[in-house]
Amino acid sequence: MSTSITSPIHRPAQWSTRALVAIILVLLYAFTMTSPCQAAGIPVHSGQTIAFLGDSITQFGWDQRSGYVRLVMLGLKVNGIHATAIPAGVSGNTSNDMLSRLQTDVLNKKPNWMLVSCGVNDVWHIPGGVSLPNFKMNMTAIVRRAENRGIKVMILTATMIGENANNPFNRKLIAYNAFLRRLAARHHCLLADVGADMRNQVKKEIAKGRQPGCLFTVDGVHPNPRGNMMMAADILRAFGCNHTQLSTARRAWLNVPWKLSVVYQVRVTRQLTLRQFLRLQKLGRKNTSAAIWDQVQSRFNDWLNARPTVQRFDNRIQHLFDSYITHKLAPISHR
């Protein structure tokens, strides 16, 4: 009878190969978990800088904790990319202004990336706007000068001017945004088509019976928290974030603070989150274009007026407002 004997020389080699494969798999998994966006081929890397060139939408996008610039940076961070923002938004700017300060506000700071958001004021400002031919020259110069410095560029299309696609401003804006898309394609820039997305989102809300006006903006132009989240998601998508990574970013955004204020002889505030803002907006009236904070103001006024014995001064107003939010709008207080 013959007995099969495994050579002791082969067994260690077999186990070494298996151990090596296991180690490689563990390292790959760890890399994916610590830096999912970079593992997916997203071109932004930790340690890089991103300049955000724009107008008041971009300025507020940085100045406010719920602004789109802040949300983009947070979205990258929770997906493993620790980059640094260079805020370069100035209220009232047109493409003329952005081109004139490009050197000092962007190029001299040597960012790895430049995101440029322009077009709203070029169309909206009367007088003082910028004609389409001049807008084309300005934007082309901005992109070329950045690329000549080795800066990668993402172009944002302009968002709506009033949540009405058929008003004269938005009809005029179509040609400006069409050029921005062509410019991005010609120079191989990334494109975040926030203008088209906003049009589609407003259209969907109207189909649900909502009245446009302040669905995505505070005043028809400047984004509210929902509009900022829309813009930030479009930018991350343009960077290449997939559905899972966008979901990770959105979960982080929902915990970002947002301040709700009303005035009744004195101003009072309630610290909420973006999750609560979205919930509050859903609870708002469908048949009005009023912003949700104006609706809360109106309801709070009615609530106080129905209580003539209540003292409405000083810190009592803050207490009453807290009670109102907690008890009358309870669904947003516990989400």
Image (cartoon, rainbow, N blue to C red):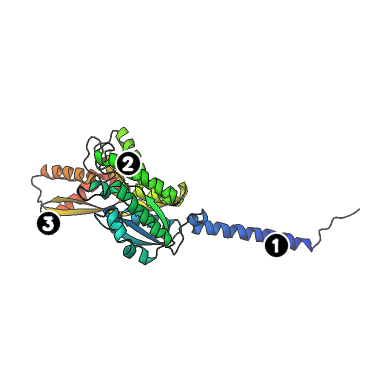
Q: Is residue 290 above or below residue 11?
A: above
Amino acid on which disc 2 is placed: Ile
In the foreground, 257 or 132: 132
Q: Earlier in the sequence, mark 2 or mark 3?
A: 2
Q: Which of the labelled discs sits on residue 250, or is there none?
A: none
Q: Is residue 79 left or right of residue 31?
A: left
Taking the view exactly as shown, the residue that stands out farthest to the left is 309
Q: Quick one: SS at disc 2?
A: helix
**Mark 3 surroundings within 10 Å by alpha-carbon count, few (fewer than 14), some (14 through 19), many (20 or more):** few
Amino acid on which disc 3 is placed: Asp
In the foreground, 84 or 225: 84
Residue at the spot of label 3: 314
For marks 2 and 1, give the one nearer the viewer.
Answer: 2
Q: Which of the labelled discs sits on residue 16, or is there none?
A: 1
- Real-space CA distance between mark 2 and mark 3, rounded to the nearest whole angstrom: 50 Å
- Real-space CA distance between mark 2 and mark 1, rounded to the nearest whole angstrom: 63 Å
Image coords of residue 114 (percent x, y): 38, 58
Residue at the spot of label 2: 174
For marks 1 and 3, give the one nearer the viewer.
Answer: 1
